[in-house]
Image (cartoon, coloured by chain):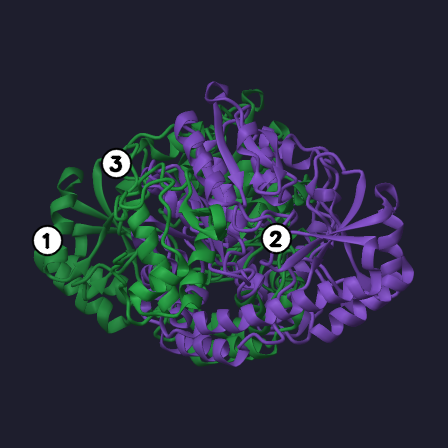
Chain colours: A green, B purple
Amino acid sequence: MLLNLQGADRPLHRRIYDALKSAMRAGQLGPGTRLPSTRTLAADLNVSRNTVSLAYEQLVAEGYVVAHVRSMMAVAHSAPVRALPPAARPKISARPLLSAYGRRLTADPAMPPAGSYASRPGLRYDFRYGRPVIDEFPREIWRRLIAARARHGALDTFGYGPPAGYGPLREALAGYLWRARGMSCDAERIVIVNGSQQAFDLVARVLLDPGDKIVIEEPHYQGSRLVFEAAGARPIGVTVDAEGLDTTRLPPAAARIRLASVTPCHQFPTGVIMPLGRRLALLDWASRAKAWVVEDDYVSEFRYEGRPIEALQALDRSGRVIYIGTFSKTLFPALRLAYLVLPPALVRPVVAAKWMADRYTAMLGQEALTDFITTGRFERYLRRASTRNAARRRALIEALKLHLGDRVEIAGENAGVHLLVWLNDIRSRDIGSIIARAAGVGVGVYSIHPYYSRPPRRAGLIFGYASLTEAEIRAGIRRFAQII
Amino acid sequence: MLLNLQGADRPLHRRIYDALKSAMRAGQLGPGTRLPSTRTLAADLNVSRNTVSLAYEQLVAEGYVVAHVRSMMAVAHSAPVRALPPAARPKISARPLLSAYGRRLTADPAMPPAGSYASRPGLRYDFRYGRPVIDEFPREIWRRLIAARARHGALDTFGYGPPAGYGPLREALAGYLWRARGMSCDAERIVIVNGSQQAFDLVARVLLDPGDKIVIEEPHYQGSRLVFEAAGARPIGVTVDAEGLDTTRLPPAAARIRLASVTPCHQFPTGVIMPLGRRLALLDWASRAKAWVVEDDYVSEFRYEGRPIEALQALDRSGRVIYIGTFSKTLFPALRLAYLVLPPALVRPVVAAKWMADRYTAMLGQEALTDFITTGRFERYLRRASTRNAARRRALIEALKLHLGDRVEIAGENAGVHLLVWLNDIRSRDIGSIIARAAGVGVGVYSIHPYYSRPPRRAGLIFGYASLTEAEIRAGIRRFAQII
């Protein structure tokens, strides 16, 4: 028998095995075909009998070949029944039957948003919100913390970890939240998750059934809305005014709203900070309506005047607030670390949901972050980052005023890492061409449209400024002004 | 006015601010109360007027204080309406209204399993399945890979990453799967997830609605069953025999089974390897029944005789197999890295679900793993680990035979990282006391009960052996033999 023994880098018995199997698949060795004896094939191929035996044994173990009379071998009847064309791709059933959740997820053909993650090439000045700030990030400190933990990690930090997160990190966070946000919470109520997206998702899974009504801000951060909609919830938009969510417009307690999702620290995208009165009104409403309040405290670390107002969580006396904090804006998104501070009654369900979703969050980042916080470096870095961000914000506002003057209106308060800018003399429908022309000169700008259920009449842009230097900000705005 | 200015380490204006707020909360400064002028309070406290002004301004910004006539200040009516006892814990609503999913999750009071993650103290010889193997793990290589990427990572690997996973890792895996498992798959069909638990969860979310019927092995890995049950699916157990899942007992095509979840590489927990004939029969059934097959290839890297049989995925010609691979057994669980190889029709829904669940998996581990694979170190390590595991398995079997002889029956094939051992002369109901006595002498052993829907008549134990040295295995079994 002649076999085509390919792959000179592999052992001979493996090449014989492959050649025999290919022949079976191609139908050259049909079911029941007797194979040559080891002696015969060894002579044909000029190899040892032992080499042939090894190949035969493997084929027997896999069920391709069965022992025949007098220790002769034959091709099994079960194996080549389906002659497998070696390079065929599986048949594509283009429209598989999905679950209701899967159908909701894929109803929008733009889901998941393709290619919106990598930096857009050719954008020298990219004002995209959410880009990581790494020019001043203490990379070397972080590298050392990571490397130290990678070397000395205990056995327990390599194995299965606790679903609520690394204990020392939860303790460190409880201390940080007390110092920075006036929040008095036990570490037991803190759950570490993979970014705030997972926090929203776990909350939605544990609390929302299809058809449940929820309140969202209008305009709003669409990431949380999409999660709630994927869970089948029906969002009711409540208008944001100069004090954030307008609590006088909240549905009555009888409306059976399950939760309200808000960004009181710096409303996204308008940049309004919710004052204390509104905060108390919202909590009152939640208590009466038996609704949960999801407080997305995504950027409370960056407020450039006065101290941050107390978190809703710190004011809550009815156990209604679900607090979400993140390290994506203070450190970097790829760390994938955020946390929930939960009302006691929700700790068990959310931890169970986390355990079910992915057991627990990868340990190395949690460990390094623990060291970063407990050594005081995190808060020192936050102070530096805050000064830096405030200067970048000032540079952006000055550049906008210098180059565009009355043509723009700057919204929002002195906080956060982005600015909402209204373009007074641009119609909303022309914003697409403005963005394209800006990209043509290397400036990335972004419409506020995605954050509104109905696009506003005025054109508006979101400028993320934290990841650009002041010089870049000035140069970018100068170029931008030239094209509008 | 006398104020109790606590906290000598904080700025004076902050201490005044805190003291005033405490007084408001405690009711000492009721709504409408006029505050002393800045001049008066400055004199009372022997500080500058400017310091008092800073404190007042912050209280105004937060809504606690309002400007009164002639620039006098007064306590706002909205703020202290609710006198907040500083240390009060939120009211606990012990039984919050949960979603159907949340109720399924928490129906079992043992969910999430508390404290089963950390090493059990006092167990010198812990045969727990799934413990990480780090005594020979190339920790220093890993540390260097991690440290190099932490230092030199590109801007893109700090920011938001692609939901399907780090591109170069998906490419590296496609090559590895081709070399190691004969799988021919494009990187586009590979999705990186946080451990195989997330793989099961995403599959369940995208494919299963409450009430859907699925096939599971009996006995089975309970981690996947729990995910499917949490999704509301109704599992139908199909018996495992000496060839794995008995395909002749699969429900008829008309039974509308949505998927079958199997462990053909090394059935969990029995250790049986599914031969080719069965594999083809299972795929035939799936194609006729229009059911998905979830192939949990959790330990295919460790087979100590012959080559691994082709994965179901490699035999699939109908696009029905959802393949799950993990690095928890080959590297370590805390890495939280696993992957799906999907039929083309499921790529978009699963990537959308991943994006919704937590955007994407943390980058640093993905990057280091890419380097580990592409430099050939991963496969070299696998060969060493395989030799080491085979020796540990042999040591375990020899020790069991030496000390327990006919009293035990060893099940399963020469593969994997655990052994199923039947105790011939122990009744099933006595296994709990055996385990407790073993723990008393420092030996951790684990019943097979959790893996069975109905406990078998014989007592059986699962021995994970990969994380113990041969000497530890021998000593542990010697001790264990003394107590039974």
Foreground residue, A77 or A100?
A77
Query: Same subunit under labels 2 and 3?
Result: yes
The spot of residue B445 in percent (x, y) is 78, 57
> Which of the 4 quarters of the picture holds residue A222?
top left
Residue at 75%, 48% (x, y): give it: B88
Foreground residue among B170 and B424: B424
Of discs 1 and 3, which sits in the foreground?
1
Q: Is mark 3 on a helix, strand or loop?
A: loop
Q: What residue type is labelled 2?
A: Val
Q: Residue furthest front?
A: A70
Give the distance between the C-alpha atoms of the residues marked 1 and 3, in whole angstroms. Answer: 21 Å
Sequence-earlier tag: 1 or 2: 2
The answer for which chain carries disc 2 is A
Q: What element carries label 2?
A: strand
B274, above or below B287, in the image: below
Q: Which mark is residue A456?
A: 3
Subunit of mark 1?
A: A
| Residue A272 screen position, x and y as percent | 41, 48
**Rendering quarter of residue B158:** bottom left
Between marks 2 and 3 in the image, the one whose residue lies nearer the viewer? 2
Residue receiving disc 1: A437
Q: What residue type is labelled 3?
A: Pro
The total of numbered circles placed on residues is: 3
Q: Earlier in the sequence, mark 2 or mark 3?
A: 2
Q: Which chain carries label 3?
A: A
